[in-house]
Amino acid sequence: MNFLPFTQKPLVSAAIGWIITLISVWAFTTLVLLAAGAPPSNAYYHIFLGAFGSWVKFGHSVKTWIPLTLCACGLLYTFRIGLWNIGIEGQMIMGAVFATGVLRLGAGAENEILFLWLSFPAGLIGGALWAVIAGFLKTKCGVNEIFAGLGLNFVAQGFILWLIFGPWKQPGVASMSGTETFPPALWLPQAFLLNVPPVGILLTIVALCITAYMLGCTRIGLNLKAIGNNAAASVLFGLHPGRYMLLAMIFAGGLAGLAGTIQVAAVYHRLIPSISSGYGYLALLVVMLAGFRTGITPLVSLFFACLNVGSIQLPIVLQLDSSLSGVIQGSLVLSTLGVHAWRKGRAAS
Amino acid sequence: MNELDSAIILSSVVAGAAPIVLAAIGETITEKAGLINLSLDGSILLSAMAAFMVSYQTQSLITGFAAGALTGAAIAAVIAVFSIYLKLSQVAVGFVLTLMTRDLSYFLGNPYSRIHGPQVLPLPIPFLKDIPFIGPVLFQHNITVYGSLVTIGLSWWVLYHTSQGLKLRSVGENPVASYARGIRPHHLQLIYAICGGLMVGLSGAVFSLSAKPGWGRPQGAEGTGWIALALVIFGGWNPVKAAAGAYLFALLQVIGIYFQGWFPSIPAQVFQTAPFPLMIFILVLMFASQQEYVMIRAHDRPWLKSALRFFSSSAPTALGKSFHQQ
């Protein structure tokens, strides 16, 4: 396999890598669309229009970007120490549950705005708590974090259903549409033009900056990296991998919990069964595609958010399933990983 | 509960566990060779969709099963090639494929949602079906269930009583040593990953053609792949124990249906999550049984000793690590 000049110059090689990646993703997606009997160019056009067609639609993309980026930010910590925090989905759900609990207390209270602000620390604690359980199972009980996290995801999903059909059911009849909607005083304020919550955007940017600082400029970030690269050597160096794993899980869970809080307080204004919308799992793909780098993560997650929002048009306009976005995202990550590994292999040989 | 009732319950356990048994044994074989196929949850869905689509188009069950099996094998081959030849993390590739194949199955299967297609007919075995109790439990099913029962014995025999099985296990335990003995680890890993993928694909086909006939979003097979992955650990990488876990899980599901009858206000999905905390608990027990302080306590307690022996098992040593062939 000597026909590609991958080893000549790094920049040229990277560019060729990207071209191969994009062409393979485009070819695969087009094949899938043709197999479904849909006109490919029409589908791409509608996805683009769905994400950028109007300010409101772009606002939807930004609304999706907020929780996705918060989750991705959290995952940067756990990936840095070499943990696969698949449980991020459940952590987001528990954040939403805790936030809903506080907001329900606030409904009808005198100073409602106080409860709105309190829902944020509550969501943070909820997510962190769920992450700590997975962390303890990993560090003290020898349960692989993937299985602990997955198990807890399913438990959290069951818990949310139980709440919606049990203690928190709507007056009258319980339904899959969720709990009762909060009074508008408990909604997170939204800016006019894009219909997005400025607090959410601000929070996400702050989280990104703190993450970049923590991972890049502090001893904690360095230690996380050291343990992730070689846990055995870090023990000899006097570090406690277990403690740092718990710390990374707390950061990840807390940020995921905030994402859940925003979904409750700013998007749905109530607790619904699918409150996480799969953003936790999607955030794992975001961070992988970003190559675990903090700077690129928000851009990748904006792109993924646009794909998600854009493909909502597919069932409306072309009677296709909206899951095409997942196919594009997955094939993009897969081919990026593949091309990257291939380049690395060629450079080494 | 009288005898007839328990026969009905056990019969539905045996039938309900059939696809899970296939998936868990397929994954056990893959992991025995040292590879992890994390994509099971999506693989099962995509092969279920492929099996239903093809059998609907051709009105033939055999082509449907073939399509399902090939789909599972193709996904497993992608993971194997990416991890063996490109040295990528098996967990990363597997996880991406989990999400991608699930979305792909929903996207491509959309036109086939909620339509009536071919499904496997029951095939009671003559004479054997008339044995009291055992007959209705084991011998009044369709061919997929018999297939799952045969697979348990067959996989056990191949793994532990043939030279091929010995080679397969040696590659998963110590690829360097097996390479020195003239075995090609990469070849065997690729082959057994594809074999395991075939079985996972068949399990998907069993879902859409027999256990939960038809296609839709959700199909009903969602989450099974994760269960199967957990069952491999639960079974301590032994196909017979993994199958036993599958029956336990199916029993829990059947009990869940009864529970729902008693608490009608709670949705069924809540009971369906019950196996997951149980799985975590069992993983904790497995870890505890390998701790020194527990072993010391077990020294003069025979019951604890036998319990420990039941739970103690270890993963293939080279599981998930890629072997660099010079």
Image (cartoon, helix red, strand yellow):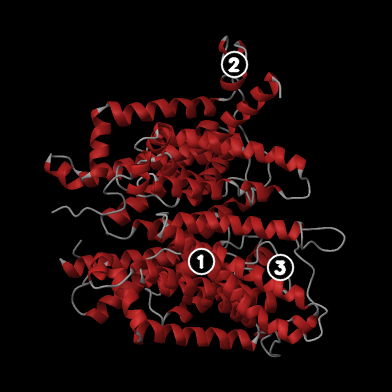
Cα distance between the residues tagged 3 and 1: 20 Å
Residue drawn at x 24%, y 33% as measured from the top left: B166
Element at label 2: helix
Quarter holding the C terminus of chain A is bottom left
Identify which residue is drawn at 33% across, 83% down.
A219
Q: Residue at x 51, y 87 (%)?
A: A206
Mark 1: amino acid: Ala
Q: Which residue is mark 1?
A: A131
Q: Are marks 3 and 1 in contact (CB under 8 Å)?
A: no
From the viewer's perspective, tell me whether residue A230 is left or right of residue B236: left
Q: Report helix, strand or loop for mark 1.
A: helix
Q: Could you tell me which secondary element the residue under label 3 belongs to?
A: loop
- Which chain letter matches label 2? B
Q: Amino acid at mark 2?
A: Gly
Identify whether A261 is placed above or below B130.
Answer: below
Pointer 3: what residue?
A271
**Is residue A291 positioned above or below A174 on the image?**
below
Q: Chain of mark 1?
A: A
Please tell me how crowded label 3 is: few (under 14), some (14-19), or many (20+) other residues with Cα within 10 Å: many
Q: Dot 1, how many residues are within 10 Å of its Cα: few (below 14), some (14-19), or many (20+)?
A: many
As shown in the figure, which amino acid type bears the numbered disc 3?
Leu
Rendered view: A328 above or below B287 = below
| Residue at the spot of label 2 | B135
